Amino acid sequence: MQKQQTILKRGLQLLGVIGFVLIMIAIAQSFIGKAEGISNQHLTSPVDDRFEVQKVFAPELPTDVNFCGEVIDLSDIEISERLDRELVVNSFLHSSTILILKKSNRYFPIIEKILLQEGVPDDMKYLCVAESGLSQVVSPAGAAGFWQFMKTTAPAYSLYIDNEIDERYNIEKATYAACKYLKEAKAKFGSWSLAAAAYNAGNNGIMKQINFQNQTSYYDLFLNEETSRYIFRIIALKYIIENPKLYGFHLKDEQLYAPLEVRRYTVSQNNIDWVEYANRNDISYKTLRYYNPQIRSSTWANIKNQQIEILLPK
């Protein structure tokens, strides 16, 4: 009798365990079913506000657009769409546009002063932005510096280059060189827009298309895609930089790069060791190179007896 009771007790315990397991399985299946239902509903039903990651808005076209004082006719659908494209592209290049906004606070005062002095429209500083993003970059074709001069072209515009010094990287001297180029192109073509286009495509390239198409306005010329977009990219950068909040960029004043305070020295001696020069002036070689990107080597033989300006931090 006692043995039968023990068997019965164990059987009831086993049934209890089985029942508990079945209940847990049922609960798990219920949760899985609900999860699949939610997932499927999310995939098949229209997206509502609960599932929006972000709201994205297309930038508005400015109503009155000009470049270097030349009014742009936005009633021409082809022209308005070209500008719209560049506004969309550059409004959503967030990282590069933010860096441009930061750098413009440091470098625009330098560039603006020279443009004014040389009688070149202030809008041409945005050409510099389009060329390099205000960075000391080198293009695949070998153009270098803020204003992207080619090594073969630079000496004609008073930029000295040897194996150890390259003044294409000197912001002030390169800006003077760009002004000279743009003024020559303006005298040749009669408008600043064509002068800017020639900065991209070359004087010969623009003149060839003017003669071939019998048109004298940049906005009426059929050009290669890069030059066709070039002026509109400059204009888009102009309006974004002048109205950053309108295009979604909110930077605090303290986030902008401050202008560099410098002392200026003239150097003309031969066989200069720049590491020794830096140490003698109580700065590091790294700092010397940062303030003087035209220095391209740790030494300068100066076999042509040139004279260059060196900037040191105050």
Image (cartoon, rainbow, N blue to C red):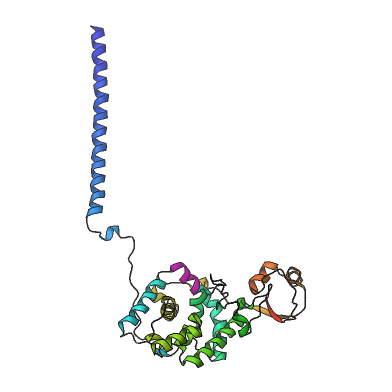
Query: Which residue is rendered at x = 23% and y = 47% of the image?
Result: 37
Give residue 202's position: percent from left, percent from top. Answer: 50, 82
Query: Which residue is rendered at x = 43% and y = 69% of the image?
Result: 93
Question: Would residue 65 be visible to someone looking at this image?
Answer: no
Question: Which quadrant: the N terminus?
Answer: top left
Query: Which residue is rendered at x = 40% and y = 89% of the image?
Result: 217
Give residue 272's position: percent from left, percent from top. Answer: 76, 73
Give residue 171's position: percent from left, percent from top. Answer: 60, 79
Give residue 278's position: percent from left, percent from top. Answer: 73, 70
Query: Which residue is rendered at x = 26% and y = 8% of the image?
Result: 3
Q: Is residue 128 above or below residue 120?
A: above
Q: Is residue 142 above or below residue 14?
A: below
Q: Nearer the viewer, residue 26 or 288?
A: 288
Question: Which quadrant: the C terminus?
Answer: bottom right
Question: Would residue 280 be visible to someone looking at this image?
Answer: yes
245 to the left or right of 289: left
Residue 28 found in image quarter:
top left
Residue 70 found in image quarter:
bottom left
Outermost residue to the front: 212
272 to the left or right of 182: right
Q: Nearer the viewer, residue 17 or 99?
A: 99
93 to the left or right of 47: right
Q: Which secondary structure is most common in the magenta stretch?
A: helix
Say whether residue 277 is magenta.
no
Residue 246 found in image quarter:
bottom left
Magenta region, residue range: 92-100
